[in-house]
Image (tube, rainbow, N blue to C red):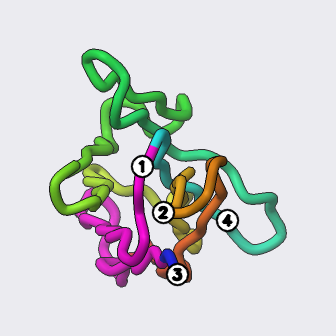
Amino acid sequence: QVRLVESGGGLVQPGGSLRLSCAASGSVFSINYMGWYRQAPGNQRELVAGISPSAPGGIADYRDSVKGRFTISIDNADKTQYLQMNSLKPEDTAVYYCYARIMPFGRDRFVDYWGQGTQVVVSP
């Protein structure tokens, strides 16, 4: 079984920072995409940042509202992705979900996996 386990959410004041972590465990043969989504109450889940571990240069994609403030990174050896969030704003408040497209051992195709979600609240 493959699992994604998140950590790092919490309450922070505007302008503060948080770092989210997401570790993939289990029968992971290959990962071709990792990313972070968020969902605020009443809103649809939206992509925050994504990166392909195998892409040359590891260029990441970010939604416009977080560019320059959030940074996604990957530790390939530990199969862990991180989201460093700086200069947080109240509108960043949401449940954050990590995502990975993984080919498990014994399978011949990639499968979508999600973390359990972690709450981020940005408030004075």
Residue located at (66% from left, 47% from top): 109
Q: Circle 1 sits on which residue?
A: 30
Q: Give how far apart the Cα atoms at labels 1 and 3 are.
A: 14 Å
Please tell me whether mark 2 sits on a helix, a strand or a loop.
loop
Q: Is residue 107 left or right of residue 27?
A: right
Which residue is labeled 2 in the image? 105
Q: Nearer the viewer, mark 1 or mark 4?
A: 1
Find disc 3 in the rendering and name its residue: 1
How far is the residue under mark 2 from the one under mark 1?
Answer: 8 Å
Q: Residues within 10 Å of mark 3 (few under 14, many from 20)?
A: few
* Lower sequence index among marks 3 and 2: 3
Disc 4 and disc 2: Cα gap in Å? 31 Å
Amino acid type for the residue under numbered disc 1: Ser
Find the distance from the CA under tag 3 to the CA under tag 2.
9 Å
Q: If you read the primary sequence from the N terminus, does the residue marked by circle 4 or circle 2 appear first?
A: 4
What kind of element bears circle 4? Answer: strand
Give the Cα separation between the discs numbered 1 and 4. Answer: 27 Å
Magenta span: 3-31
71 in relation to 40, above or below: above
* Residue type at the position of mark 2: Phe
Instruction: Report the mark closest to the observer, 3 or 2.
Output: 2
Report x, y in % for residue 95: 57, 74
Residue 26, horizontal then vertical, whole percent:
39, 77
Give me the residue at 39% from left, 29% from top: 60
Amino acid at circle 4: Gln
Q: Is residue 33 within the magenta segment?
A: no
Earlier in the chain: of badge 3 and badge 4, it is 3
Could you tell me how many numbered marks the image carries?
Answer: 4
Real-space CA distance between mark 3 and mark 4, rounded to the nearest whole angstrom: 26 Å
Mark number displayed over residue 39: 4
Q: Relative to the observer, which residue lies in front, 73 or 100? A: 100
